[in-house]
Image: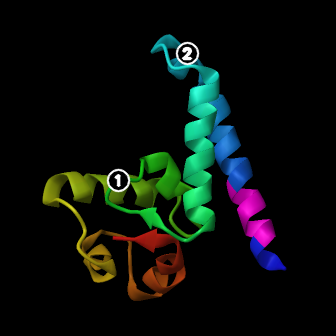
Amino acid sequence: MNAPLKISSLALTLIASFLLCTTPALATGTSTTSALAGLAKQASSLSEGSLDINSATQELLAAVPGIGSQLSEAIIKYREAHGAFKGIQDLLNVDGINAELIEKISPFLKF
């Protein structure tokens, strides 16, 4: 019963992100429909628990319960500096991530 609520909250977060990025998307020639379709696909990935941490955008990582904007930025910076994460334990190398958080976010991620 709680899962649909989490997905709904996540969907609202992604829609809000879309609304904030509509103008840049249009300025680059990306249609609103294409941008919205991309966000829908990303939301689908989270609902299935299969967000690829090595290719996810900062916005999508921030939508994962427990990560937020600061940790998503730290994850992206670490990934850019050190390359792809090979497993969930690699996230312990990111400042601000501990074993308790890994347990919370691991159902949403794949490597």
Q: Position of residue 11 (x, y in %)?
A: 71, 52
> Disc number at residue 30?
none
Residue position for label 1? 55
19 in relation to 72, above or below:
above
Density class for disc 1 (Cα within 10 Å; few <14, some 14-19, many ≥20) is few
70 in relation to 48, above or below:
above
Residue 7 inside the magenta-drawn segment:
yes
Dot 2 amino acid type: Leu
Dot 1 amino acid type: Ser
Residue 51 inside the magenta-drawn segment:
no
74 in relation to 6, above or below:
above
Quarter of the image where the N terminus is located:
bottom right
Image quadrant in which you'd find residue 70 = bottom left
Density class for disc 2 (Cα within 10 Å; few <14, some 14-19, many ≥20) is few
Secondary structure, mark 1, is loop
Secondary structure, mark 2, is helix
- In magenta, the rendered stretch is 4-10
Work out whether residue 27 or residue 31 is closer to the camera in this orientation and state it: 31
Residue at horizontal 45 percent and vertical 15 percent from the top: 28
Residue position for label 2? 26
Q: Where is residue 39 in the image (x, y as percent from the top left)?
A: 59, 42
Q: Position of residue 90 (x, y in %)?
A: 25, 77
Q: Is residue 111 left or right of residue 108?
A: left
How far apart marks 2 and 1 lie (CA) works out to 23 Å
Residue at horizontal 33 percent and vertical 70 percent from the top: 111
Work out whether residue 32 or residue 95 is closer to the camera in this orientation and state it: 32
Residue at horizontal 64 percent and vertical 26 percent from the top: 33
Work out whether residue 32 or residue 64 is closer to the camera in this orientation and state it: 32
